[in-house]
Amino acid sequence: MSDKNQDLIDQKLQHLNHDGVDRRGFLKCMAWAGTGLVWTMSGGVPVSRAFAKAIDRSAGKAGDFTFVQISDSHIGFNKPANPDVTATLQTAMNKINAMPHVPDFIIHTGDLSQLSKPSEFDTLDQVLKGASAKQIFFVPGEHDMLTDNGEQYLERYGKGTKGTGWSSFDHKGVHFVGLVNVANLKAGGMGSLGTEQLEWLEDDLKGRSASTPIVVFAHIPLWTIYPDWGWGTDDSEQALSYVKRFGSVTVLNGHIHQIMQKVEGKVSFHTAMSTAFPQPAPGTAPSAGPMKVPAEQLQKVLGITDVNYVRGQHSLAVVDSTLG
Amino acid sequence: MTRKSAWIAGLAAPVMIATLLLVAGSRSAKANDQPSAASAAVKIDNFVFGPQTITVPVGATVTWTNSDDIPHTAVSTEGVFKSKVMDTDEKFSYTFTKAGTYSYYCSIHPKMTGKVVVQ
């Protein structure tokens, strides 16, 4: 590559250098965005396989399980590039239901609705009713907090949660933590967890064996991807300090409507595609708003994430696939 | 014409003229003292409040219009005003009765900030 080209690339990626993703890793990430992908970590070394081969379920041991992450359904949104987000969410459900294995549960990482309207939540519930997995866990996005600071969201999806909707649960030996970083946002800031939630998190993780696999899910990315667009969480450092000691940590986020991945020590970060509309890559458009794509390409930039836990493996295998 | 009616007629004209001048005068005085209109507009587009800082006279009404394809809000950082969610083409107005500087932001996308200067 010529020096001139290298300089241009360096300039473009300069603002991203502080997030721990190096240039090569970033370019790899962008090439992966929107494609069907199996990405597994085996003993700390990333291994990719063609999507068709996927995970060999026949060799599965008891205690292995899968779950699916969907995100940013934005029910109520009706503009380009997607005038029918309910239909694309249904497509996502059909895809989940067509999987050879029934996921143990589904996690929705927020922005369920576009405007926190009861009719939007109702429509979402209708679609989710048809899911093969009967258990669904939620964390809110900023679009779900638009009326009464999220009281309506909490009433519908907050059972068993604390504060603005955070909670934890255990499943087959894996500890899951759902965090809320979209409440009480301060002017000029990014996502925010807040002191009360951080204190709860520290307490929740205390005394757990470091060999317990941890999965943390929250709407806004818990690592700084692009501050200008609010793609990060102001106080996530503290939260991450509590999980650092664990042998396997997987962080699942949404909000940015595209796949981004990062590995930092034993912590793997991953953001999911939206089931509603794509957003531009950092800095490639005037704003983070909906990205318009030709109708025939829409399904290629929307997707779901299948997560596989195999007992004894250090990390969870995160498999992204597009809707079409 | 009687002396009384003549006197009244004589008085009425100057009074009328004086009144007209007073009203006209006060109107133009208003226009000269406060060159900005009593209403101002902020356009929201591409996650930006435009203009980011707007200066208005005391008593002015600022109207925010959301031209973005994503909902936004306008919320004062000091709790002075708080809009409902504005979807595309929806508006919010607030009348500023006190002089001062009012910082605000979008509570959904807090990186979006703006200022209303009332003087």
Image (cartoon, grey):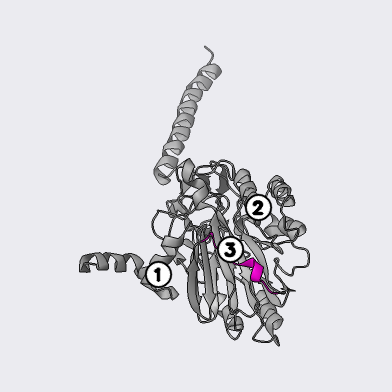
Q: Which residue lies furthest to the top in this view?
A: B1
Is A85 left, or right, of A117 in this rendering?
left
Instruction: Check residue A315 for magenta coloring.
Output: no
At mark 3, the secondary structure is loop
Q: Are marks 2 and 3 in contact (CB under 8 Å)?
A: no
Say which residue label 1 marks. A16
Q: Which chain carries label 3?
A: B
Magenta: predominant secondary structure element? loop
Same chain letter for marks 2 and 1: yes
User: Is residue B6 in view?
Assistant: yes
At label 3, counting other C-alpha atoms closer than 10 Å, the crowd grade (few under 14, some 14-19, many 20 or more) is few
Say which residue label 3 marks. B78
- Which of these two is toward me, A206 or A149? A206
Say which residue label 2 marks. A98
Q: Mark 2 and mark 3: span between their CA atoms?
A: 51 Å
Is A318 drawn above or below residue A82 in the view shown? below
Amino acid under label 2? Ala
Is A160 left, or right, of A4 in this rendering?
right
Question: The magenta stretch spans which residues?
Answer: A51-61
Amino acid under label 3? Glu
- Which of these two is toward me, A223 or A294? A294
Is A244 left, or right, of B28 in this rendering?
right
At mark 1, the secondary structure is helix
Residue at x 47% of width, y 23% of height: B13
Coordinates of residue A246 in the picture (x, y in percent)? 61, 84
Is B16 drawn above or below residue A315 in the view shown? above
User: Is residue A190 in view?
Assistant: no
Q: Which chain carries label 2?
A: A
Amino acid under label 1? Leu
